[in-house]
Image: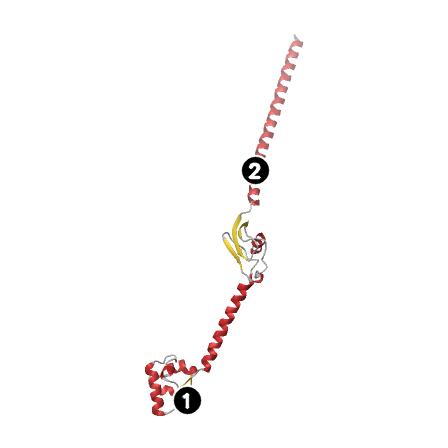
Amino acid sequence: MKQKRIFIAVTVLLILIAGLYYSIGYRAEGEEELFSAEDLSLENPGELDNKQDNKTEEICIYICGQVKKAGVYYLQENCRVADVIEAAGGFKKGAAKEQVNLAKKLSDGEKVYIPSKKETDSAEETENDRQDREHTSVEEVQKMKINLNEASESALMTLPGIGKSKAAAIIRYRTEYGFFKEIEEIKKIEGIKDGVFQKIKDYITI
């Protein structure tokens, strides 16, 4: 009888130990699975962020003129003029390379035009011609001064501030008092004061 009780007690103890061991093992396995799930949930956002960071936006650029393959190109954001020229196959032989700012940063929808040497040379010639004309005009005015003692009424009327009445007054003064001895003498004529004289002094002589 005593042995039977001992057997029962040992059996119950073994059952309790087995249950406790099973309980501990199950809980550890659950924690491991939970940790793995959390680990996964923490890693995914970082991977997505990295993918977003690595993704570079593109911009659309139109290039024409003296390049080998003019057209529309999609390039990475913050690209330069040099990049779109390279994408277009490079310069043509007649391109005015020195007139192009290769370092300029481009924005979406921008147009890049590459001029030819003929265009830039023509523009320089036009500017030089304009300067020559201005210089010639000044010289011609200085050479073609109006002689107060010889000019006709129509010639006097070409002077700034001198109309028909003042031109007639100059001729009348010249007829009554003789030739002008100095250009400042014209201020003696009625209606021609210092203000008018300052306008015409560079264009008159005697």
Image quarter in which the N terminus is found: top right
Residue shown at 52%/66% (left/top)?
A: 122
Please give the residue where the numbered disc 1 appears in the rendered image.
Answer: 182
Q: Earlier in the sequence, mark 2 or mark 1?
A: 2
Residue shown at 64%/14% (left/top)?
A: 11
Q: Secondary structure at mark 2?
A: helix
Residue 194 % position (x, y) = 38, 83
Please give the residue where the numbered disc 2 appears in the rendered image.
Answer: 44
Image quarter in which the C terminus is found: bottom left
Q: Is residue 10 above or below residue 29?
A: above
**Residue 189 visible, this angle:** no
Identify which amino acid the numbered label 1 is placed on: Glu
Q: CA distance from mark 2 to mark 1?
A: 98 Å
Q: Is residue 136 above or below residue 112?
A: below
Residue 205 % position (x, y) = 43, 86
Residue shown at 62%/25% (left/top)?
A: 25
Q: Nearer the viewer, residue 7 or 146?
A: 146
Judged left or right of residue 41, residue 139 is: left
Residue 107 % position (x, y) = 51, 53
**Residue 118 visible, this angle:** yes
Judged left or right of residue 203, residue 10 is: right
Colouring rule applied to residues: secondary structure
Q: Nearer the viewer, residue 79 or 94?
A: 94
Q: Is residue 107 above or below residue 3?
A: below
Identify which amino acid the numbered label 2 is placed on: Asn
